[in-house]
Structures are given as C-alpha cells and as structure tokens.
Image (cartoon, rainbow, N blue to C red):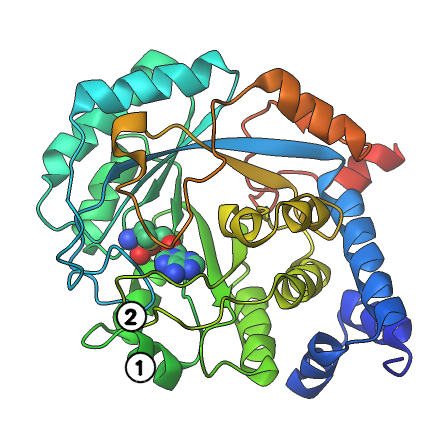
C-alpha cells in the first residue's frame, strides 16, 4: 500500500505544500485499498464543498470547422475526410429550447477553432439566448482576441471553457504544432480579467505523458483557481496521427480526477463524456470519486456524428430523459440539481459546507 495515503491526503487538503513527487506517487499507486481511500476522500471533499447535487449542462456543438492542429483531435484541420458544418442561429436556438425544456439552466456552445464565424453574429446569438431563455451561457470556442471575448461577455456570456490540455509547454508544443502555449495562457488570463467563470482542464493518457506531468497539471489547475476543471481520458481518432495509440486508462483518469478534487476543493468537475466512451461504469464511478457535473448533448442528430473529436463519441448518447438521469442519481444516493450551477468561487458565494453547518 502507498505509504500512509490518508495522511498525505489530509496534509494536501489542509493546504500543505503541493509537491509534485507526492502527487505523482499517489497517481502511481496500483494498490486497490489505497485507490479506494483516494476515491472515498475525493467523494467526501466533493460532498463537503459541492453538496450532493449533480449539476447538468446542455452542450450544443454548433460547428466542427477547425483551424487547430491538435494531433489527437479528429476535428483538426488536416482531417480532410471530415465533412464540416456550421449550424444557423435558428437551429442552435431550437437545441437551446430543447435543453431548457428539460429544466437544464446552462448551455455550453462549443465549436472547433473556427475563425470564419462572425463575432457580431455570435454576440447577437448570445443576447437572444439570454433574452429568450434566461439561462447561463458557457462558451467553448477556443482562443479568441481580447476584444472579441469582451464583446461576448458584454452580450451576456457567463462562462468559458478552455482546457490547457497539458501544462507542460514542451509537451503542449509537440501536441499542437504551430499553436502557441503562451496564447492559450494569455486567453485564460483575459477571460478571468473579464469576469468570466473560467474552466480549464487536461487530457489523461496522451502518448509520452508521465505521472509527474499529471502532478504538475494538478498544481497548475490549483494555482489558477479555475471555477471549473475537466479531466478526461485521451481516446484515439482513426483519421489523426494518433490513430492506433492506446486510449488513456479509465483508472488513471479516475485517480487524476479524484486527486484534483482533493486539491481544488470547490471547482465544478464533470464526469466527462470521454470517460463514458471508454467505460460507462467508470463514468458513474467518477461521480463517486469527485465529479459533480454531467454534460448532456443537445447537438442535432443530423450533425452529431460529424462532431467527431474521437472514435465512438456519439455512441450511446441517445435522447435525454430527466427520469433516467434522476434514477441514475438516486442509484448512487445523489440527486439532480436543476439550479444554474454557478461557480462556488465567486465572491459572496458561501460554501456548501458553511451553509450546511447552520
Ligand atoms: N476548440 C475549442 C477548444 O480548443 O477549447 C473546443 C473544442 S475542442 C474539440 C474540445 C475538447 O476536446 C478539447 O479541449 C480536448 O480536451 C478534447 N479532445 C479533443 N480530442 C480529444 C481526444 N482524442 N481524446 C480526448 N479528448 C479530446
């Protein structure tokens, strides 16, 4: 058993210094009892800071056009086999109406690194969604200039997801030829400065990644105090240079997620769609190992398969049902939280454990 994992987790949880060797050793543990201690510890941390609700976000993947070079991603610009699409406002609004009708109060508008869509059009869409549905709007459209993301914030966008993917600059450069690690960091800084609730995250199991790199990633996520943290496994895509690579392991993803929960405490953390693709049981287990969010896909059926980030992505993502979701939550002694699911890091927001103690 990894030597005294519980006291190490206590020390991390109490704000002791975060050293990469200790984090990497925890991630490397293969021992079943130690892993269970880690998962239970993360679950308790999640309960204390986030409560027992599972928050839902509805995602609409409105365009797969992408100028990015991410070697692992099926949307990358070199994948000429992929038919590209852009949804029109009316179709996006219809998907938003559908998720709102299911009581979901956050829409995530996601696309590739699409530099062809008009920022003014997108701003109008953001205000229309706000006016019609009054729900939270999260953007996940990649790196954009300061003025553009400011305009969207002014139009009513609330949150922004931009995963760092890896916090190791050399590894980032290797995975994203011609893209800029510094620009990604700069965008994350701009988003915070503009008052967005900001989410970031990493991919686990990329070729060449070590547990020490993952430990550094966890430290990066903590130091930046992100409102949302997404940790999902790498899954290969047949039309990329990573075709044939082994997928990230469900277990390493779970350990990384659990440790990130202990370290970041009150960030919203999804049980990612990618985790469900490699193992549907692990997707549920993630909810008992630190995760408190589920992303539900509302991309129109006719283009869903074209949002092809990795192989098997839309398999099993059938029609959403509140009943099935609530039943799943009850099965793990949790419930679906139909609130907006705002950041718990925002000034003035009380932590759940403080509220519960009264
Ligand atoms: N273009 C936006 C961006 O870069 O933030 C959002 C779209 S991008 C396709 C969304 C996420 O997909 C990325 O942040 C990345 O983590 C994930 N992704 C892409 N390819 C993947 C793969 N093969 N396995 C797992 N996750 C992948």
Give the left or right position of residue 47, taking residue 324 as reference.
right
Residue 134 appears in the rendering: no
Q: State the quadrant of the C terminus.
A: top right
Image label count: 2
Residue 36 appears in the rendering: yes
Separation of residues labelled 1 and 2 (CA atoms): 9 Å
Q: Position of residue 290 (x, y in %)?
A: 71, 51
Q: Residue at x 59, y 47 (%)?
A: 271
* Some atom of ligand 1 lies within 8 Å of the CB belonging to the residue at label 2: no
Ligand 1 quadrant assignment: bottom left
The image's mark for residue 174 is 1
Q: Residue at x 25, y 57 (%)?
A: 143
Secondary structure beneath label 1: helix
Above or below, comparing residue 348 to residue 31 in the picture: above
The image's mark for residue 71 is 2
Secondary structure beneath label 2: loop
Q: Earlier in the sequence, mark 1 or mark 2?
A: 2
């Amino acid at each position: 058993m990894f030597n005294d994992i519980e006291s190490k987790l206590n020390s991390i949880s109490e704000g002791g210094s975060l050293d990469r060797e200790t984090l990497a050793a925890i991630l490397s543990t293969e021992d079943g009892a130690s892993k269970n201690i880690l998962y239970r510890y993360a679950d308790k941390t999640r309960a204390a800071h986030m409560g027992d609700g599972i928050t839902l976000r509805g995602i609409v993947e409105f365009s797969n056009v992408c100028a990015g070079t991410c070697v692992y991603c099926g949307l990358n610009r070199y994948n000429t086999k992929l038919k590209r699409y852009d949804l029109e406002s009316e179709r996006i609004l219809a998907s938003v109406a559908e998720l709102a009708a299911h009581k979901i109060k956050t829409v995530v508008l996601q696309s590739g690194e699409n530099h062809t869509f008009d920022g003014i059009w997108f701003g109008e869409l953001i205000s229309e969604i706000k006016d019609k549905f009054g729900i939270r709007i999260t953007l996940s459209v990649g790196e954009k200039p300061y003025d553009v993301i400011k305009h969207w914030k002014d139009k009513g966008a609330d949150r922004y997801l931009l995963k760092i993917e890896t916090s190791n600059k050399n590894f980032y450069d290797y995975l994203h030829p011609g893209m800029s690690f510094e620009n990604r960091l700069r965008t994350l800084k701009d988003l915070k400065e503009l008052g967005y609730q900001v989410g970031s995250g990493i991919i686990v199991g990329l070729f060449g990644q070590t547990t020490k790199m993952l430990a550094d990633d966890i430290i990066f996520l903590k130091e930046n105090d992100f409102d949302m943290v997404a940790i999902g496994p790498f899954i290969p895509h047949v039309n990329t240079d990573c075709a044939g690579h082994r997928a990230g392991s469900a277990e390493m993803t779970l350990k990384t997620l659990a440790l990130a929960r202990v370290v970041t405490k009150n960030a919203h953390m999804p049980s990612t769609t990618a985790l469900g693709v490699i193992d549907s049981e692990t997707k549920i287990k993630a909810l008992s190992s630190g995760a408190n969010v589920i992303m539900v896909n509302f991309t129109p059926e006719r283009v869903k398969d074209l949002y092809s980030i990795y192989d098997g992505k839309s398999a099993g993502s059938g029609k959403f049902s509140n009943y099935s979701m609530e039943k799943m939550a009850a099965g793990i002694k949790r419930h679906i939280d139909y609130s907006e699911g705002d950041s718990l890091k925002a000034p003035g927001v009380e932590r759940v454990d403080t509220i519960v103690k009264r």
